[in-house]
Amino acid sequence: AQSVTQLDSQVPVFEEAPVELRCNYSSSVSVYLFWYVQYPNQGLQLLLKYLSGSTLVKSINGFEAEFNKSQTSFHLRKPSVHISDTAEYFCAVTRIDSNYQLIWGAGTKLIIKP
Amino acid sequence: DAGVIQSPRHEVTEMGQEVTLRCKPISGHDYLFWYRQTMMRGLELLIYFNNNVPIDDSGMPEDRFSAKMPNASFSTLKIQPSEPRDSAVYFCASRTGTKNTEAFFGQGTRLTVV
């Protein structure tokens, strides 16, 4: 079975500061990895995903995540956050062999302090 | 495509009443998921369908909950009778059958049972 751990329920940072949101997973088989973002009163939307190839993946709004197989991690980073990044961020995995179900982390609320 | 469409966006009902939540997935998507999100329990998968057939309903909390997908463009989640502890945001999501594609979420239905 797979599991996803997001250790930080909330991460407060000052505007323009860097941020890292941590995600660790457990799986006996290879997985695809996803980060979703949920803005206040909205549904979840895909931020970025790792399928294969380069372990560093980037989103259009400056976020990036690096897949580290040895540490089973997929941490999300941004070098300089903006107030508009205030949201909850969810890490998720799905098996690459057959199971189409997404396994979700508990989410991390990113709180931007002015 | 307009994305995944859920209705209503907000629902307030009295305890004991029947509640029906509706979802129109993205055309061409083979998978449909119903999630529930609460502060206490986070994001929970209730049930998912593949080609209109329920595959895994192990997340449905009680017999009071039922879900149907009569055709590829419509699904319902019904709660009968509703209870205050059912208050949550319910999301519908859909995806294609290709393994490495993401799920697309609707805006959610905020249910309040008083």
Image (tube, grey):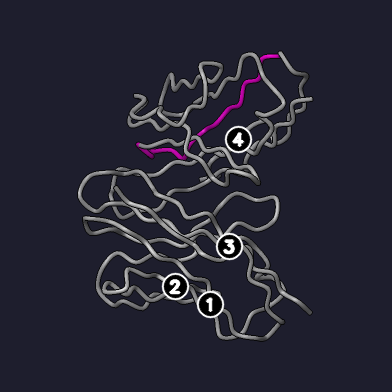
Which residue carries the number 2 mark? A75
Query: Given this view, does label 4 or label 1 mark the residue nearer the observer?
Result: 1
**Cα distance between the residues tagged 3 and 2:** 12 Å
Q: Position of residue B47 (x, y in %)?
A: 44, 31
Q: Do the CB atoms of the residues marked 4 and 3 lie less than 8 Å apart?
A: no
Residue type, numbered disc 4:
Gln
Question: Residue B93 has which mark?
Answer: none
Tell me where the magenta segment starts and ends, as one range.
B17-30
From the viewer's perspective, tell me whether residue B31 is left or right of residue A114. left
Which residue carries the number 4 mark? B6
**Chain letter behind tag 1:** A
Residue type, numbered disc 3:
Thr
Which residue carries the number 1 mark? A20
**Chain letter behind tag 2:** A
Mark 4 element type: strand
Question: For this rendering, which residue is in front, B15 or A35?
Answer: B15
Which residue carries the number 3 mark? A108
Density class for disc 1 (Cα within 10 Å; few <14, some 14-19, many ≥20) is some
The residue shown at (44%, 66%) is A23
Mark 1 element type: strand
